Image (cartoon, rainbow, N blue to C red):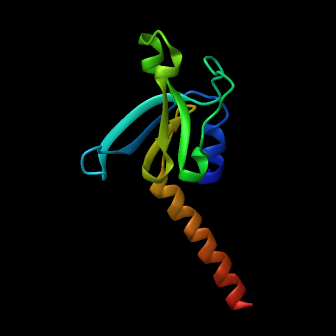
Amino acid sequence: MNYKNLLKEMQSGKIFTAHFLKKDKKTKEFIIPRTITARTGVKKGNKGIGLSFDPMARGLLPVLDMELSQTEKDINNAKRFVNLNTLIWVKISGAKYWISDLVIDESIKEIKKQNEIIIK
């Protein structure tokens, strides 16, 4: 699996667990590790207004925090963003994917393609 396919899987509405770094409000640095069990595509609670920005353009994936949704009366209070730029690993469909491994694999494949072009 590559990173693009993993992102498609995460956006498909399946439940997944993600571990990423969260921004500290005081220092504005990404230093707080966060693990979330979430899913995308939840329409419940939408008021039809939408967001005032494009979260994917900022590297944010809008999700529903499954643990918070069990305790919150208003489901909108359980909606969060997963920062794709600081994503460390994702567990989906029983398989755990380390983002660094996926990026390295994609880089190696790209280097091999470039080498084949150079050799020809």
Q: Is residue 80 visible?
A: yes
Give the x, y percent position of residue 76.
Answer: 52, 21
Which residue is pictured at 69% across the width and 90% down the height?
119
Which residue is pictured at 29% across the width and 43% down the height?
25
Location of residue 51 with respect to 102 vertically, above or below: above
93 or 44: nearer the viewer: 44
Q: Is residue 2 visible?
A: no
From the viewer's perspective, tell me whether residue 68 is left or right of residue 3: left
From the viewer's perspective, tell me whether residue 100 is left or right of residue 119: left
User: Among all residues in the image, which is located at the extreme left?
Assistant: 26
Location of residue 90 with respect to 43 vertically, above or below: below
Give the x, y percent position of residue 103.
Answer: 52, 60
Which picture quadrant has residue 40?
A: top right
Give the x, y percent position of residue 7.
Answer: 61, 45
Which residue is pictured at 53% across the width and 51% down the height?
59
From the viewer's perspective, tell me whether residue 45 is left or right of residue 100: right
60 or 37: nearer the viewer: 60
User: Among all residues in the image, which is located at the extreme right?
Assistant: 120
**Quarter of the picture holding the C terminus:** bottom right
Location of residue 106 with respect to 52 vertically, above or below: below
113 or 90: nearer the viewer: 90
Give the x, y percent position of residue 90.
Answer: 49, 41
